[in-house]
Amino acid sequence: DPARQALENALQPPSWAHLAGTDEFGRDIFSRLVYGTRITIQTVLSVSVIVGPIGLAIGVMAGFFGVRTDAILMRATDIVLSFPSLVLALAFAAAMGAGLGTAIIAISLTAWPPIARLARAEA
């Protein structure tokens, strides 16, 4: 259990019982690290599932339909790319409110342009 405290095991070095040692409250650092990665993995997978289809759809449409559609979609892509992605994601998150879902959407709204450009080049 990553939250279980055992003060008698406080600040132990790495061993077979505690692969990364223990903290000042005797909690196993490795189990806390593994437990904490759940949110990161969920966020990364969610963003990937959202960003891939959006970028792919925009890039393939721009490459397939050509001249006018290409100009419009690639200018929109250039506009998104012209802003620093972290600043743009923070602005989206501030506008939509706090929460993990909001962070996933904000990151997704700023991460699709490189995929769209690649898909356009391949199309």
Image: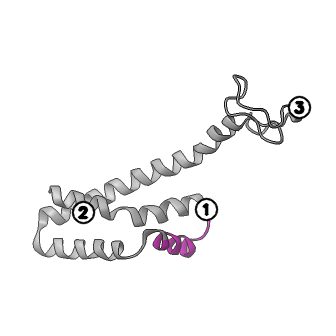
Residue indicated by mark 3 = 8
Q: Position of residue 4 (x, y in %)?
A: 80, 36
Q: Nearer the viewer, mark 1 or mark 3?
A: 3
Q: Earlier in the sequence, mark 2 or mark 3?
A: 3
Is there any visible trace of residue 60 in the rendered image? no
Residue indicated by mark 1 = 99
Please rate how many residues cluster around mark 2, counting C-alpha atoms within 10 Å: few if below 14, some from 14 to 19, many from 20: many
Q: Residue at x 13, y 76 (%)?
A: 68
| CB under 8 Å between discs 2 and 3 | no
Q: Is residue 92 magenta?
A: yes
Q: Is residue 31 magenta?
A: no
Q: Residue at x 35, y 76 (%)?
A: 82
The magenta-colored residue range is: 87-99
| CB under 8 Å between discs 2 and 1 | no
Please say if 24 is above or below 66.
Answer: above
Please rate how many residues cluster around mark 3, counting C-alpha atoms within 10 Å: few if below 14, some from 14 to 19, many from 20: few
Residue indicated by mark 2 = 117
Please rate how many residues cluster around mark 1, counting C-alpha atoms within 10 Å: few if below 14, some from 14 to 19, many from 20: few
Mark 2 to mark 3: distance in Å? 56 Å
